[in-house]
Image (cartoon, rainbow, N blue to C red):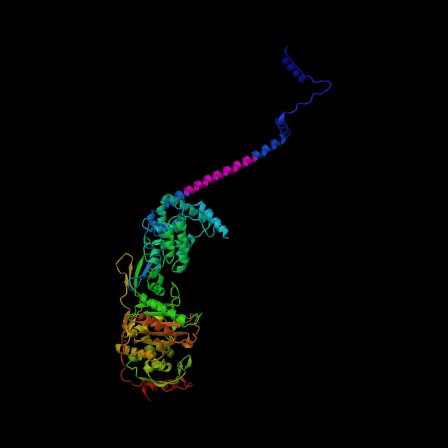
Amino acid sequence: MTDSKRRKSGLVADKRYGSKSKSPAPAKPRGASGKLAQKRKAKSPRRSGGNFITRFFGWLFGLVWGLIWRTGMIVVLLVGLAIALIYSTLPDVSALLDGRARGSVTLMDRDDKVFAWRGDQFGGVITTDTVSPHLKNAVLATEDKRFYYHFGISPRGVASAVRINLREGRGPLSGHGGSTITQQTAKLLCLGVPYDPDVWKSEAEYESDCRQGSLWRKIKEAVFAMAMEAKYSKDEILNIYLNRAFLGAGARGFEAASQRYFGKSAAQVNPSEAAMLAGLLVAPTRYAPTNSLKRSQERAQVVLGLMEEQGYLTADQAQSARANPAHLSEAAAAQAGGYFADWVMSELPDYFGGNTTEDVIIKTTLDQRIQTSAEEAMRFIFQEKVRDGSKAQAAIVVMSADGAVRAMVGGRDTRVTGAFNRATQAARQTGSSFKPFVYATALEMGHSPLDTVVDEPYCINIPGSGQWCPKNYTNKYYGRVTLAQALKDSLNVPAVKVAEAMGLDNVRKVASEFGIESDLAAGPALALGASESSLLEMTGAYAGILNGGSSVEPYGLTELRLQGESEVLMGTGTGIGERVINAEAAGQLIWMMEKVISEGSGRRAALPGWQAAGKTGTTQAARDAWFIGFTADYVAGVWMGYDDNTPLSGVTGGGLPAEIWHETMVRIHEGMTPKPLPMQAPRQPKVIAQPKPAKPQGGLGQAVDKLLKDLFGN
């Protein structure tokens, strides 16, 4: 046996039999592996518990994941079905370009120039191919720079909007919405729900519902947007957006807005104009250039920066656009005739006016040069002659002798729409401006301007009211005066005496036939303008005096037709009606009224180089002050007062109203050749029998006796 074998046997024996004297030492694990074995053996019970927890959480995760992906699949399936359903209901894109619920009214002046719009204006269909590329780029840069790359919604945009809203202290869905152009178009379409007047109280309520921003609404909006992306091309969606977006001042779509603000097609706008139009999208009313050109230009600067940043403009192009900001067209800048346009619209049948479903074109009598003259005159007097902070108001009407209204200012704020129009809606006491109709009655009944009447203390017993004693403004009496002098100096007692002598019913008849349709006072105070009337009515009545004694119906519309049609559906040739007084009486009355301006209470209204006639008017406690007058070419009326009937301080009809009239007429007649008034010198005078002064305590019988003696002689 070899040595190696012996060694091996010995080793085996040693393992099999231990020494009696000493127990064999336990075998030690070798190296790290041995130590790990001991640790594993010691922790084996805890390893069983760990497996249970792991299996539990694994099971729970699997359950949750299963619910998530199954729910997700259900949601995706439902969204897909919703998209498919909406897709099937979407019409051809051409049916969505003009979605207005009502039509528009375009108003043109006497020279066929547009000066105002009402309703929802739609300038015509534009497309991404026909619109100015600057405008298309401005819209994309401002509203949705990734429009051509997303599928209708932009998660990145929504997340960014939520972050901005939270940073600015608002709710996550308040303020910035992160909506894509497709989502905005879905909102413009009201998610496919058309306007139904039987369901909605008004179009405004319908649109308000369309614009609500609840979470559920946002979800429906997103689904509708994805359906649109499936149905239409990107350019078709953008076409709908360009044609339906509301851009302020009643303009629907960029073509209407471009025509409204710049007087040109959306195909022709330059970068600065395009930036201004695109800037309106964020807040059409706030940034409308007709509300604040400066604010609109500042917003356009931001849009130009975005266009440059996104590569739509070079640095030189952007700088040039900034240096040359967009400006309004002449008509849009003037904003002339807002009160006039409102008045014309109020005279139309609803189906051609505020509720029209057609696009209507109206030619009017407005003269923008005269309108501007009246507005400038109003501003000048209030800036130069009225104390700062005064709440006093004024109104102006200018018309031709046939009743064609050439200008209308319904208040101190001349650039308004839908405001209270003091020229047409305010019924105020007329004061002494009514007196020409008293004397018109006398002249028509055969009297002369040189006939006389006694100005003296005078009282009348009025049944049910007691004794009434009119007094002159000066609290003085001037004895025997001619009718011309009585009108020139606006004496009250002679006016009352003449009205009583001619018959109050006759005076009322003449005044009403001249066009004063308001209820006329029944008592003798009628002669002093106790009745109420509007400035438009009174100016029209004076136009009847100028034209030779025929009644006048003030008018502003000359032709009405549908857009694109040549047939005239409504028209007015003239406002002259029936004769009220004969031509001789009218000519003599004009002669008397000329004295008011050249010699009497209306001297502040005098026009150098021109003959002018008119009459002042101041009511009790100076609550109303009037001046109405005319040249051979135009009639103008001015009213001044407070809306709440507060008395004017130190103002009479011969004061500020006469000055406003003067400033208006000077501007209107600039460059015109003076023409003489159609007045006629009076015939030889005779005395009008007058009652003797009545004592204040006289009874009704005594007053009647004296009136009879006056009429029939002593």
In the image, residue 249 sits, relative to residue 472, either above or below, namely: above
Residue at 46% over, 52% down:
175
- State whether residue 277 appears in this view: no
Q: Quadrant of residue 531?
A: bottom left
- State whether residue 650 appears in this view: yes
Q: Quadrant of the N terminus?
A: top right
Q: How many marks?
A: 0
Q: Position of residue 203 (x, y in %)?
A: 39, 56
In the image, residue 529 sits, relative to residue 334, either above or below, namely: below
Magenta span contains residue 533: no
Which sits in the foreground, 426 or 313?
Answer: 313
Q: Position of residue 384 (x, y in %)?
A: 40, 71
Which sits in the foreground, 33 or 686?
Answer: 33
Q: Quadrant of the C terminus?
A: bottom left
Q: In the image, which residues are magenta? A: 56-81
Q: Position of residue 33 (x, y in %)?
A: 61, 26
Residue at 49% over, 39% down:
68
Residue lying furthest front: 316
Residue lying furthest right: 21
Q: Position of residue 607 (x, y in %)?
A: 32, 75
Residue at 57% over, 34% down:
54
Q: Quadrant of residue 107?
A: bottom left
Magenta span contains residue 77: yes
Q: Main secondary structure of the magenta part?
A: helix
Which sits in the foreground, 27 or 511?
Answer: 27
Which sits in the foreground, 140 or 644?
Answer: 140
Q: Quadrant of residue 668?
A: bottom left
